[in-house]
Amino acid sequence: MTEVQNTNAPQQDVHQLLKVRREKLAALQEAGRDPFQITKYDQTHHSDEVKELYAAHEAELLAGRKEPDVDGLDEQQAREAMTQDYNERRAIMDASPINVSVAGRMMFKRVMGKASFCNIRDLKGDIQVYVSRDALGEESYAEFKKSDIGDIYGVKGYIFRTKTGEISIHAQEMTLLSKSLQILPEKFHGLTDTDTRYRQRYVDLIMNEDSRETFVKRSRIIKEIRNFLDARDFMEVETPMLVSNAGGAAARPFDTHYNALDEDVKLRISLELYLKRLIVGGLERVYEIGRVFRNEGVDTRHNPEFTLMELYQAYTDYEGMMELTESMFRYLAEKVCGSAVITYNGVEIDLEKPFERITMTDCIKKYTGIDFDAVADDAEAKKLADQHHVEYEARHTKGDIINLFFEEFCEEKLIQPTFVMDHPLAISPLTKKKPGDPEKVERFELFINSWEMCNAYSELNDPIDQRERFAAQDAAFAAGDEEANHTDEDFLNALEIGMPPTGGIGYGIDRLVMLLTDSPAIRDVICFPTLKTLS
């Protein structure tokens, strides 16, 4: 096991400290007090509940009681008056004690002879515990004094407020529930090395409150997404992760082999084609939140294994998906962040006002002056690319060049929420053509903070057109495009059965969490991100 060390301690001292911890465990086991034999503990409250409970009880019992008047008293008299007031308040509270049982990791300990203080950290925060020999008994207190930072304890006792005003627990029983055999990072410096934080997320969660809060908030974001969609009568479903044809997105899949069937399969790169099959089956409004896998690079916004949500709604189009998306992002910000105006990396993002809408070609024209609607053909588009130093491949068409220009000159400018609409047909093989403009499709991407947050279509439901699009994708793959889709005969059969007009959309959940938690990298919002294995 990799050691979690206090980097301020010499290596030989660390090994000695680790040895001592194991010796303490051996002594406990020999005495018949092995903490690892304990199977459960009755935890009645978390730290925040303890504080809230006592504050409310205190307000009720001490209602109307005034602070002592120390005006005109010298320092000694004032101190005596404050002490007397504290003792009187304490007597009132102790006459009506609140007994609690908490459990968590000991993060701090200060031994002072016959009495000690420690801090216990649980899911909701820290609570101070007062531990005395008189309350615990000599043997239990001696055992507590041998405890180490990182040990997990159960604490039973009653709540009180110290003279310094801190709500604490007066321990009447301390139970060692798990012995920590490793050393946590030194508390004042914490765990700051990012690689160690990602590889040992369990230590990161212990030491870094911000990290812990990020993952608590991530869970809440997903819960609120479900609440929002449930209120709109969407049904949550599950579709296969192992597929014979990984379609629905432009990405390289991971290949594997199914031994029982002696068949090569792939990990899914999208949720789209199976969810559309359910629309064909009459399930009208469906969504799935799940892992997808793309054999691509790793950077601050990409992880090969990530969480995607896709939803499909019959009898609507990409305009309906815009309304749903704008409403959902605003709802999530208000529920999770408390306001539809949020801050990311010091920049204010306004999710309250209507999101801007602009076509892809108009966006390029806005930032480059080039009007691709007036570009006649592929050759002219490539000439423009050469003039503006935009790299492309020989197989690329005008539609591909338009997308390359957008990525090069526009994305970084889109900070406030912006729907970029009406993409080229060439890069949208599963999307309905735009009426009156056959080179474009009814598609949009939402950009916030220069990131693509989602991708949506008026879904192509014409099986004849879809077969032609798949054939073009097969040709692109043969020409060297490893991210091209492949013909999916069963999906085509489903379309021939008949799919109603449908709007569909996919959201990168990890990027959404990054935005709503002000996190700088995707690895900060994935519990266990992809990392190269250490040799």
Image (tube, rainbow, N blue to C red):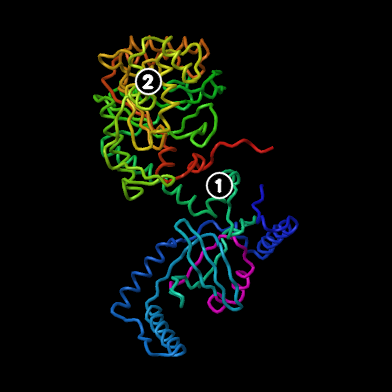
Q: Residue at x 55, y 47 (%)?
A: 201
Q: What are the residue bounds of the magenta stretch?
A: 132-159
Magenta region includes residue 151: yes
Instruction: Count residues near mark 1 (Cα–Cα under 10 Å), then give few for <14, some for 14-19, many for 20+.
Output: many
Magenta region includes residue 413: no
Instruction: Count residues near mark 2 (Cα–Cα under 10 Å), then give few for <14, some for 14-19, many for 20+.
Output: some
* Residue located beneath label 1 in the image: 201
* Residue located beneath label 2 in the image: 370
Residue 3: give its label. none
Image quadrant in which you'd find residue 459: top left
Inter-mark Cα distance, 1 to 2: 48 Å
Image quadrant in which you'd find residue 231: top left
The answer to whether residue 326 is left or right of residue 47 is left
Q: Residue at x 26, y 33 (%)?
A: 323
**Amino acid on which the number 1 mark rests in the picture:** Arg
- Location of the C terminus by quadrant is top right
Q: Residue at x 33, y 14 (%)?
A: 374
Q: Residue at x 48, y 52 (%)?
A: 210
The answer to whether residue 192 is left or right of residue 516 is right
The answer to whether residue 256 is left or right of residue 291 is right
Image location (x, y in percent) of residue 382: 45, 13
Of mark 1 and mark 2, the one earlier in the sequence is 1
- Callout 2: helix, strand or loop? loop
Above/below status of 38 relative to 111: above
- Callout 1: helix, strand or loop? helix
Image location (x, y in percent) of residue 11: 73, 55
